[in-house]
Amino acid sequence: MNQSIERDSTHGPQLFGQPRGLATLFMTEMWERFSYYGMRAILILFMAGAIADGGLGIDDKTASAVYGLYIAATYLLAPMGGWIADRLIGQQRSVVWGGVLIMLGNGSLAAGDTRLFFIGLIVIVLGVGLLKPNISALVAQLYPEGGSRRDAGFSIFYMGINLGAFLGSILVPIVAASFGWSAGFALPALGMLFGLVQFQVTKNHLGSSGLVPLGKPATWWPIVGFMVVLLIVATLALTGALALNPVRISIVANWTMIALAAGYFAYLAFFAGLDLNERKRVVAMIALFAACAMFWAGFEQTGASLNLFADRHTDRVIFGWDMPAGVLQGVNPAFIIIFAPVIAAIWVTLGKRNMDPSAPFKFALGLMLMGAGFLVMFLAARYVVMGEKVLPTWLMLTYLLHTFGELCLSPVGLSSMTKLAPARFVGQVMGLWFLATAIGNNLAGQFAGEIDPNNLPGMPGQFLYLFWWGAISGAVLLVLAPFIKKMMAGVK
């Protein structure tokens, strides 16, 4: 019998009652999220910034499309990263090589060359896709016995994600404002280097977890083919032989991802040999998938239109300090750290009284809270139209409502999809969940691009549209919640 299965997580070195390897993964993920969210906090500001100020001078619509495609691609490539680890190199090596790519990609952004900038974005996407799913898999492997101890480990790990996001969102914009865009992009590269060094020094605490691929061995040819195609397209684009329109690509990408999702759901429902209850659960999964995509389309305005709003229309002078706009990106992870235990305690308390709301109800609540955040922005934008700058508190209230929405939807959705999926399709369904997030993120870039900086009177209407987007979709899901719960066929 495999030794990792015979032993449980109470064996070996412990730290605060958890396996010592959890600290290794906590710190690695913290630095990776420092890098990801730190760069994200200044990404659209740099792309839309004036050339005279060191920015790229790209119009808002194009910059928003690039932003949406970038964050969507990081989730879209996660299933491929999981496949590489399972079939080719194992989780530990995937984390290392993913971190190296993230570091090199951010270094390319810091170089200050426009062509290297877009190459850097592609390299970061590849790195995140390789690291992100596999470091979570390593956490799970530390607890082969499963149970509540694994749940506690993931809760601690989740705090590392948000701690890194908070620190990166605060420090990177400050460095960029003080020392220039190149220094701002260099800091995430340095952070990822710290994470890699820490992982290499302490990875012995992971033991054999993720050291070798556990799935059926495969060939590198699919990956080589993908990289060759990517290299050819990038070369043609950079040499001008192929004209790429990010706005058009974004639209095509969205319909392509929707078609892929529809095709896979159709396969599950009609051709996968599922029994009646499993087919019912596919209907529930479709509803949660759509709600997830719609939520992230609104939520991810945080790094796009709301970041530009913070830069252009917010009075950020605090006691004489001109706070960089990107610093406000740290509000959401700070709220997550504060309120995640509170929301979790509420669900536990309601569960003890047999009053815990169903997953569809929580999703509906999340969508409506997201919409409510944009009602706040609608009111703030009306002041901007009158020629005023507004206080950061408007954005902070929006982020607070969005955080509550995220806590209602994101962890609940992840758990629900693993329960609803047929046991033999869990891995594929989790890849599908990443696809829902990718669709939402890409849509976010399209929505952000519709806010025209040269048409300020139209801004309140755009935020009001996003309010109705969340409010109506949440209300529809609320009405359908009893039916969806029935389709969950006993899954709670």
Image (cartoon, grey):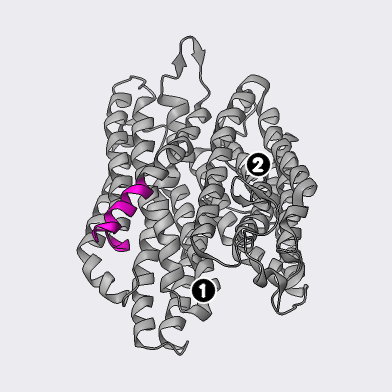
Q: Main secondary structure of the magenta part?
A: helix
- Quarter holding the C terminus? bottom left
Q: Secondary structure at mark 1?
A: helix
Q: Secondary structure at mark 2?
A: helix
Q: Is residue 393 above or below residue 355?
A: above
* Apparent side of residue 302 relative to residue 203 in the rendered image (left or right): left
* Apparent side of residue 453 relative to residue 178 in the rendered image (left or right): left
Q: Give the label on residue 31, or none.
A: 2
Would you say residue 194 sits in the magenta stretch? no
Nearer-the-camera pick, 241 or 357: 357
| Residues in magenta, as a range | 343-360
Nearer-the-camera pick, 138 or 283: 138
- Quarter holding the N terminus? bottom right
- Amino acid type, residue under disc 2 in the picture: Trp
Q: Residue 111: name its quadrant.
A: top right
Residue drawn at x 24%, y 54% is: 472
Q: Is residue 464 above or below residue 395?
A: below
Q: Earlier in the sequence, mark 2 or mark 1?
A: 2
Q: Is residue 450 visible?
A: no
- Amino acid type, residue under disc 1 in the picture: Val
Residue drawn at x 39%, y 48% is: 406
Residue 331 on image: x %, y %: 45, 33
